Image (spheres, rainbow, N blue to C red):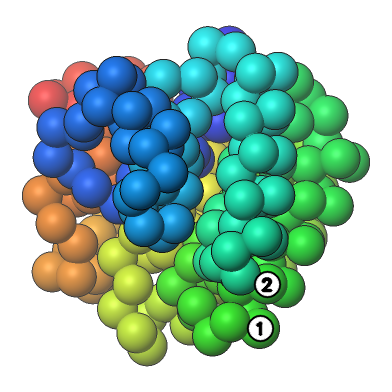
Amino acid sequence: MKLLGILIFLFSIQLVNAQKPPSAEELWATWENDTVPPVKRVRALSNFIWNNILFRNPDSAYVLAEIEYQYAVENNLNEFRANALNMKAMTKQLQFKFEESLSLLEESYKIYEKEGLSKQALLVKANTAHQFSMTNDYPKALELFNEVFDSARITKDARALKSVFTGITNIHQSRGNYAEAALFLEKQLAEYSDYMDASQNLTLISTLSENYSLRGNYRKSI
């Protein structure tokens, strides 16, 4: 359960639109309408997979992500090729097939980099770091998190920063270093909270509150 919770949090940071999403019916209708521009169609399919299928049925999500990939190839939409690969990687992570996931993440990252989509590439690298953390390869995870942090703090990329802070905190706590985790998160919140929106800050504050609670410091956890 703990691993699944980390996965769900990891994937949730990739949501671009925090507003109420279109319904499944609307998204599917857009995808099936061949008079709609290709970019809008494939985006609808991607959102349909994310909002309605991914966490409930990874096998079906994988099939649909492959359809997204092939459509992106046919229409020369390389950003969505990379997106589809990243989505396929998520399905493998949910099934604990980490070697397959890693290969897909690497391919997705290369496409984003080639297309000059640095923010998306950075999030894929952060996802890869989280995966190494989940398989207890903490040195590799920290190496990647630090690379992401070095880029994100320059560009003030809030989603990447939040991913790094959560990932490193989880590593400290997985090693039993709860006090060190709290100190790390307190420092990052103090320095970078202005870069993040209310929802992103709230997630980190909730993580810190849980840390205090686990250590019996209920006054600070409130």
Quadrant where the N terminus is found in the figure: top right
Q: Are marks 1 and 2 in contact (CB under 8 Å)?
A: yes
Residue type, label 2: Ile
What residue sits 89% from the left and 41% below the top? 99
Tell me, yes or no, if residue 140 can be seen here.
Answer: yes
Density class for disc 1 (Cα within 10 Å; few <14, some 14-19, many ≥20) is few
Viewer-closest of 22 and 92? 22
Residue toward you, 136 or 74: 74
Q: Which residue is mark 2?
A: 111
Residue 92 lies in quadrant = top right
The residue shown at (21%, 31%) is: 22
Q: For the C terminus, give its image quadrant.
A: top left
Residue 100 x, y percent position in the rendering: 86, 40
Left or right position of 28 against 219 = right
Label 2 element class: helix
x and y percentages locating residue 7 in the rendered image: 56, 31
Q: Is residue 127 above or below residue 203?
A: below
Q: Nearer the viewer, residue 220 or 84?
A: 84
How far from the left and from the top, in percent, is residue 169? 48, 47
Instruction: Give the residue pinned by disc 1.
Output: 114
Q: Label 1 amino acid? A: Lys
Q: Which mark is residue 159?
A: none
Q: Give me the residue at 55% from left, 58% from top.
A: 80
Residue sitting at x 33%, y 28%: 29
Q: CA distance from mark 1 to mark 2?
A: 5 Å
Q: Is residue 91 visible?
A: no
